[in-house]
Amino acid sequence: VPKTSRKIVFVLGGPGSGKGTQCSRLVAEYDLVHLSAGDLLRAHMKSGTADGQMVADMIKNGQIVPSYVTVNLLDGAMADSGKTQFLIDGFPRNEENRAAFEKTGMEPEFVLFFDCPEAVMEKRLMGRNEGRTDDNAETIRKRFKVFLESSMPIIDYYGKQGKVRKINADRDASTVFSEVRKLFEQGFD
Ligand code: UP5
Ligand code: MG
């Protein structure tokens, strides 16, 4: 399948806004492949390469990994899946990421944006217990700052193109999902 005929939805929102949770629900109902950029990077950091160490250090500090790493991982995973419809969760996170992705010729159909107050996201992240090196008070503060300064402008960029479908993510996961489903049914083709 040529890259340009892939159907892509970007799933964006702050740390702990529920991107992964909602993507899991979506793949259970629709013919979609869920690719979490963060999960791909966490797997990559265990690869034992020089890149892997850089990724580990950047995640621990809440910094955004350069696109040459992330775009390669995403593109590889898309190709390996043999599928054509993707939820790309947690990418692009800054202007450099967005521009690099655009250069591949791929573009998102739309962006699902999970809007959630910081206090709610913080409580969720502090309550999660999966051993992530970035789920501690200090790194969470850095992640919030990077989200506001670098990632929100990307959501605004797609907003100006009329591509953003915004969801109030400060509700229980099932209520959020019923809205996500409605937004999906507004067309993905
Ligand atoms: N939860 C979820 N929904 C809930 C709800 N409605 N009500 C109550 N609780 C809810 O959820 C987080 C927690 O909240 C879970 O315990 C869940 O049960 C509960 P989750 O669905 O995991 O939220 P999500 O938005 O996916 O949170 P995550 O922590 O994964 O978001 P981040 O954006 O911070 O993490 P990501 O893995 O995308 O990135 C991590 C790091 O990788 C980045 O900081 C960066 O360093 C690096 N990165 C890059 O450099 N480039 C990339 O492209 C991607 C990542
Ligand atoms: Mg996630």
Image (cartoon, rainbow, N blue to C red):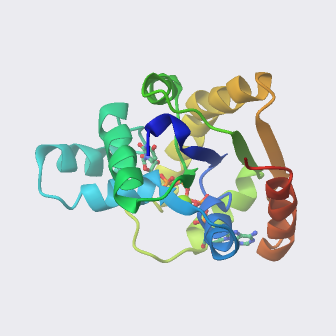
Height in image: 173 above or below 34?
A: below
Examine the image and state in which quarter residue 80 appears: bottom left
Examine the image and state in which quarter residue 58 appears: top left
Q: Relative to the observer, which residue lies in front, 185 or 66?
A: 185
Horizontal and vertical percent position of residue 130: 45, 75
Asked if residue 105 can be seen in this view, the reply is yes
Instruction: Answer with left or right where residue 145 lies relative to residue 162.
Output: left
Horizontal and vertical percent position of residue 71: 38, 39
What number of labels is visible? 0
Q: Residue at x 52, y 43 (%)?
A: 91
Instruction: Answer with left or right where residue 145 lies relative to residue 110.
Output: left
Instruction: Answer with left or right where residue 155 lies relative to residue 186.
Output: left
Height in image: 65 above or below 112?
A: above
Examine the image and state in which quarter residue 122 appears: bottom right
The quarter of the rendering in which ligand 1 is drawn is: bottom right
Height in image: 44 above or below 174?
A: above
Asked if residue 170 can be seen in this view, the reply is no
Horizontal and vertical percent position of residue 23: 63, 64
Q: Residue at x 52, y 53 (%)?
A: 84
